[in-house]
Amino acid sequence: MAIKYDWIVNEMFAYPQADGYQNVVFGVAYTVSASEDDYAASQSYQIPMPPPEANFTPYADLTQDQVISWIQGQLGPIGVAAAQDQLAQMIAEQQNPSVVTPPLPWG
């Protein structure tokens, strides 16, 4: 089975007013999760957002998919791949641990 990745927006930080707009998002807290069979890993991050552009979307109209596309756009393909690679390594470590804690031999 292939690793499944999920990007989730946890929180958005906004200025009440900026550049003539209301509730302008300037940062996003998000989590990237990965799962494969019975193994799972996740990491949480925060990322700044650029100032609004001419195609400003009112806060109430934002969707999670739109904000995730902003995050991934800020990261670029290399940043997205790096986040997912880190989670893949965490899952690989769970599947084949490099350190174990066997029971004490005298117990």
Image (cartoon, helix red, strand yellow):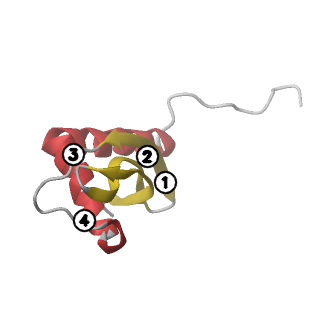
Horizontal side of residue 97 vs 81, given as left or right: right
Q: Which of marks 4 and 3 is in front?
A: 3
Observer-nearest residue: 39 or 105?
39
What kind of residue is marked 3? Pro
Determine which residue is flagged by label 4.
66
Contact between labelled residues 1 and 2, with CB atoms less than 8 Å apart = yes
What x and y, as percent, mark residue 18? 29, 49
As helix, strand or loop, the secondary structure at mark 1 comes to strand
Residue 30 image offset from top left, x and y in percent: 41, 51
Q: Residue at x 41, y 41 (%)?
A: 45
Which quarter of the rendered picture does the N terminus lie within?
bottom left
Q: How crowded is mark 4: few (under 14 residues within 10 Å), some or many (20 or more)?
A: few
Q: In which quarter of the image is residue 43?
A: top left
In x, y percent, where is residue 28? 38, 49
Disc 2 marks which residue?
A: 91
Q: What element carries label 4?
A: helix
Amino acid on which disc 2 is placed: Ile
Q: Is residue 97 above or below residue 55?
A: above
Q: Is residue 95 left or right of residue 87?
A: right
- Which one is in front in this view, the residue at disc 4 or the one at disc 1? 4
